[in-house]
Amino acid sequence: MSVLSDLRRRALTKGLFGGSRVWLFLGIAAWSLRALKWALRPDPKTVYKGRLLVGETIVLTHEPAAPTRRKRRKAKKAERRSRSKPEPLSGRA
């Protein structure tokens, strides 16, 4: 949990329900910051807007994200490990 969410929770219990004015004002400030952050969030981006004719369809795809540096390093390390290991014997005598 973030510091601000802890502050909001504590302000609700001690300020609103507990009767402490200091906590009440801290809570008002914390909730105002949250509301301001929500109000200033960016609008969703429109990629395409248009009309479809009868019989036309839209295909939505989600391409996987490029692998992170950590995943690339891990794959490279696993590949090196698999190349350096001798193949196990198929049967024991």
Image (spheres, grey):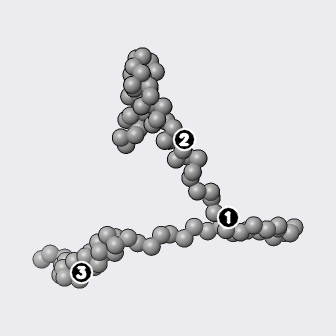
Judged left or right of residue 47, residue 39 is left
Along the viewing direction, whichever of 49 and 92 lies nearer the viewer: 49
Return the disc, 2 or 3, that comes first in the chain's sequence: 2
- Work out which quarter of the rendered image holds the C terminus and state it: bottom left
Return the disc, 1 or 3, that comes first in the chain's sequence: 1
Along the viewing direction, whichever of 17 and 86 lies nearer the viewer: 17
Amino acid type for the residue under numbered disc 3:
Arg
Residue shown at 38% from the left, 34% from the top: 7
Label 1 and label 3: CA atoms lie apart by 44 Å
Q: Position of residue 73 (x, y in %)?
A: 29, 74
Judged left or right of residue 34, residue 78 is left
Mark in front: 2 vs 1: 2
Q: Which residue is mark 3?
A: 80
The tally of labels here is: 3
Along the viewing direction, whichever of 51 and 40 lies nearer the viewer: 40
Amino acid type for the residue under numbered disc 1:
Thr
Mark in front: 2 vs 3: 2
Amino acid type for the residue under numbered disc 2:
Ala
How many residues crowd around disc 2 within 10 Å: few (fewer than 14), some, or many (20 or more)? few
Q: Which residue is mark 2?
A: 35
Q: Which residue is mark 1?
A: 46
Q: Residue furthest left?
A: 93
